[in-house]
Amino acid sequence: MRKSMLVLGVVMSALVGVFSAKAEETNSANYWMAVCKSGNPTKHLVCMAYLKGMIDGNMNSGGIWFCPPPGATYDQSFAIIIEDLERQPENWHEDFVVLATVALAKVFRCPHPGEINFRK
């Protein structure tokens, strides 16, 4: 229990630091690429949690944007997103979630594009 509280405290203090930037800046890939690639373990954890929320949101909506195969991991999705975005820094001013979604949609295509995928 004490260890859980310590971890929660570390994560919460990291969130305060990470989200201290202006709100409009925190949506861009410029902002999130700096967080995700900072080399700081706490910021990496925040980045992974943010991406996990995006991925889970897609999957809880029936996998409408991308459809990872069974066994695909969050680490795998993270690597796909970062690799794709590193190839196009000219787009980093754009919304990070949109760019990350497009990166995953290129790799994890749904069986019928444009249709909602209800497989789980």
Image (spheres, rainbow, N blue to C red):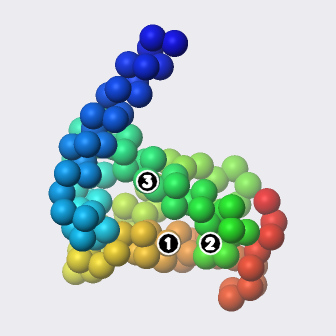
Q: Is residue 19 visible?
A: yes
Q: CA distance from mark 1 to mark 3?
A: 13 Å
Q: Earlier in the sequence, mark 1 or mark 2?
A: 2
Do the residues under discs 2 and 3 have CB atoms within 8 angstroms? Answer: no
Report the front residue among 33 and 88. Answer: 33
Q: Position of residue 11 (x, y in %)?
A: 35, 34
Query: Which of the numbered marks, if any, corresponds to residue 113?
Result: none
Query: Which of the numbered marks, if any, corresponds to residue 66?
Result: 2
Which element carries disc 3, helix, strand or loop? helix
> Which residue in the protein does label 3 denote?
50
Q: Is residue 78 above or below residue 109?
A: above
Residue at figure coordinates x 73%, y 55% from the top left: 70
Q: Quadrant of the C terminus?
A: bottom right
Q: Position of residue 61 (x, y in %)?
A: 68, 68
Q: Position of residue 87 (x, y in %)?
A: 30, 73
Query: Disc count in the image?
Result: 3
Q: Residues within 10 Å of mark 1 (few under 14, many from 20)?
A: some
Do the residues under discs 1 and 2 have CB atoms within 8 angstroms? Answer: yes
The kind of residue on which mark 1 rests is Thr
Question: Residue 56 vs residue 33: left or right?
Answer: right
Query: Which of the numbered marks, if any, corresponds to residue 101?
Result: 1
The kind of residue on which mark 3 rests is Tyr
